[in-house]
Image: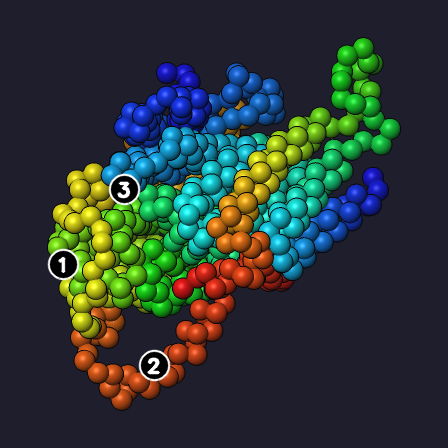
Amino acid sequence: MGALPALPVAVPLLVAAALVGLAPVIRRRPADAVAVATAATVAGLCAALLLQAAGGPVVYWFGGWTPRQGIALGVAFAIDPVGAGLATLAGVLATAALVFSWRYFEAVGTLYHSLMLVFLAGIVGFCLSGDLFNMFVFYELLSVSAYALAGYRTEDPGSLQGALNFAITNSVGAFLVLAGIALLYGRSGALNLAQLGQALASGPADRLVVVAFLLLLVGFFVKAAVVPFHFWLADAYAMAPTPVGMLFAGVVSELGLYALARVYWTVFSGPLAADAGGLRAVLLGAGVVTALVGGVMCVLQHHLTRLLAYATVSHVGLTLTGLALLGPAGLGGAVLYAVADGLIKGSLFASVGIVQYHLGSVDELALRGRGRHLPWTATLVVLGALGLAGVPPFGTFLGKALMEEAAGAAGHAWLTALFVVVAALTAAALLRAAGRVFLGLGGPPARAVDAPPGPAHPTMLAPAALLLAGALAIGLVPGLAGRVELAAARFTDRPAYAAAVLQGASGPGGADAESHPPGYPAGPAGWATLAAVLGLALGLWPLLRRRPSGPRRATARLWAPVGAALRSLHNGHIGDSVTWLVVGMAAFGTLLALVVR
Amino acid sequence: MSLLPYLIAAWLFLVGLYGIVTSRNLVHAVVCLSVVQSSTYILLLAIGYERGGTAPIFLDVRVGTRAVDPVVSALTLTDIVVGATVSALLLALAVQTYKRHGTLDPEEFRSVRD
C-alpha cells in the first residue's frame, strides 16, 4: 500500500472527471450512487491514513523524488493525525451531504456530483500537503469548486450574489497567501514546509519574514472568516444548497485555522519564538472578537441557514482562542472542538434542509408552529443546539474542557466566561428558532405553503442523526483526549517534523500516549450546563411572554441601535467586504509591528 | 536587483483593490481582480530574476551559467491557470446575475437581501 497517501486525492478527482465525461449518458441515481460510494471511499482511506499516522508521521514523495542530503527536491504529502483527522471529517461530511442530496434535490445534474468530489479532493489534498505551494494549489482547487457550488442555484439571485462576494473576497485572500509564499521562497529558496522551517530557524524574524507571516495570516483568516474578514460568509453559506452548506460550515472554515496552525508550527515558530507572547495576545483578541460578533449576529437572525452561518463564525472564533494559546494543549482542545463542532454543524444544516424541503421556507417567523409534524427533525435540532452549547457528553464539551484547562495554565482563565457566553448565545438562537418552528411558541401559527408533506425521508434524517452520533462518540471514546494531546504535541514539534520529512526519521510511536484522567472534569461540566441553561432561558424567554414588559422594552431600546448598526455593516456588498479586508490587514499589520521586536 | 518590479507589484495590488472596492459593474470588478492577481505574477518573476541570466534550459551550456529561477516561472504558470479558472467562473456568475436581475451593478443587490 505504498501509494495509499495519494489515493484519497486521486480517486475523487478521477471519478469526478469520469462523471463529467459520462454526463450525457449517465442517469441521476447511478451518478448519486457513484458519488456517495466515492466519498465514502475517501473517508475510509483518510481514516486508514489517520490510523497509520497515529503511529508516526507518514511522508509520501510524489514520483519518488525523495530529499537528497536533507534538501527537498520533490513535492510531498506529510501526514499527521491532525491533518488526516480533518481530511476524514471532510470525507464523512461529504458522504453525508451526498446521501442527503439523494432526496433533497428534485433534479440535479452530474456536474453537481463532480463539483462535490473535486471540492472533497481539494480539502483532502490541502490537509495532507507538506509543501506550501501545493497547499496554495489545493486551496484554490477547493475554493473554485466551492464558489461554483455556492452559486449552484442560479435561479436564486441571493445565491449568485453570495457566490460572487465569496469568490472575490476569497480570491484576494488567496493572492495574499501567494504573495506571502513568494516572499518566503525569495528568502529561503524552499517551498517544502520542513525545509522552510529549517532555513528560517537560524535567525530571528526580520521584516521580510514578518511581512510574509502577515500575508499568510490574513489570507488564511479570510478563509476562516475571522472578524473583520467574515463579511462574505453569511451570504455564501446561507444561500448555498443545504448539502453544500453542511460541508462549508462543517470543515471549510476550520481549514483556514488549520493552515495557519500548520505554517506557524512548521515555519514561523522558530523565527517568531521570542515574540510568542505578543502574537498570543493578537490572536486571542481576534478570536474573542470573532466569537462575540458571530454570537450576537447569530441571535439577530431569523433566517435559519444564516443563523447557522453566524454560529459558524462564532465557533471559529472559539477554535481560534484555543489555537492562540500557542501550545499543544490548547491546540489539541481546538482540534477536538473543531471536529465535533463540524459534525454538529453538518447535522444542523441537514436538519434545516429537511425543514426547507418539507415546509418550503427557512424563515423562522414564516414557519411558526408549522414543524409540529416533524418530531424527529425537532429532536435533532434541539440535540444539535445542546451540542453546540458544549453539553457533555458531546465532543464539543471535551474540546472546550481541554481548551479551558490550557487557558487556565497559560493564565487566561477568563476564557471560560467567553465560552459560556458564546455557547449560550448560539444555543439561545437555535432553541428560540426550534421553539418557534416546532412548538409554535410566541404567536399564532404561520400560514402553510404548498410543500411535500412529512414525515422526513430516511435519506435525509439518517445523515443528520449519524453526524450527531459521531459528535457524541467523539466525546465518549475513552482515552481520546490523551491521544489528541499527543498528536497536538507532535504537530507543534518543529524539529521532529523536519526530521521526519527531510531525513525520514519516524517520530515516537503512539504507545506512549499520556494517560489523561478519565471521566469528566467537574468544573467545566458545570460551566457547560450553565451555558445550556442560560441559552435555554435566553432563547425561550422572549417567546413565552405575551406582551413586552417595561424592562424588556427598555432593553430592546438599548439594544436596537447596536443590532441595527451590526446588521447594516453586514450588508453583503462586495466592495465593503474587500474594504474590510484591507482595513483588517492594516490592523493586523500594525499589531504585528507592535508585538514583534 | 532593482526595486522597480516590487513597486509595480505593490501598485498593481493596490490599484486593483481600489477598483474592486469602487466598482459599479461586476465585469469591471472581475477584471480588477485579474489586475490584483497580475501583481502576484510580477512579484514571483521579480523574485526569481537573475540579471544577465539566460532561460533555464540546461542543455549545451557550461556548468555554472547564470539562469533565471525556473521554479518561480512554474509557480507563475500555475498562478495564471488558477487566474483563468477564477475569472471564467466569476464571469459565468456575472452573466447569470445579469440574466436573472437585469443589472450588473453590485449596489443594486443590497435590496435582494432580507
Which circle, 2 or 3, is nearer the viewer? 3
Mark 2 Cα shell of 10 Å, populated few (<14), some (14-19), many (≥20): few
Q: Nearer the viewer, residue A233 or A436?
A: A436
Amino acid type at mark 1: Arg
Vertical side of A275 occupied by A92: above or below = above
A346 relative position to A576: left or right? left
Taking the spot 48% from the left edge, 28% from the top edge, the residue there is A77
Taking the spot 54% from the left edge, 61% from the top edge, the residue there is B108
Residue A104 badge: 3
Chain bearing mark 1: A
Mark 3 Cα shell of 10 Å, populated few (<14), some (14-19), many (≥20): many
Element on which disc 2 rests: helix
Distance between the Cα atoms at labels 2 and 3? 39 Å
Discs 2, 1 touching: Cβ within 8 Å: no
Vertical side of A230 occupied by B50: above or below = above
Chain bearing mark 3: A
Quarter of the N terminus of chain A within the rendering:
top left
Amino acid type at mark 3: Tyr
Q: Are marks 3 and 1 on the same chain?
A: yes
Residue A202 x/y as whole percent: 64, 40
Residue with the mark numbered 2: A556
Q: Are marks 2 and 3 on the same chain?
A: yes
Q: Nearer the viewer, residue B1 or A383?
A: A383
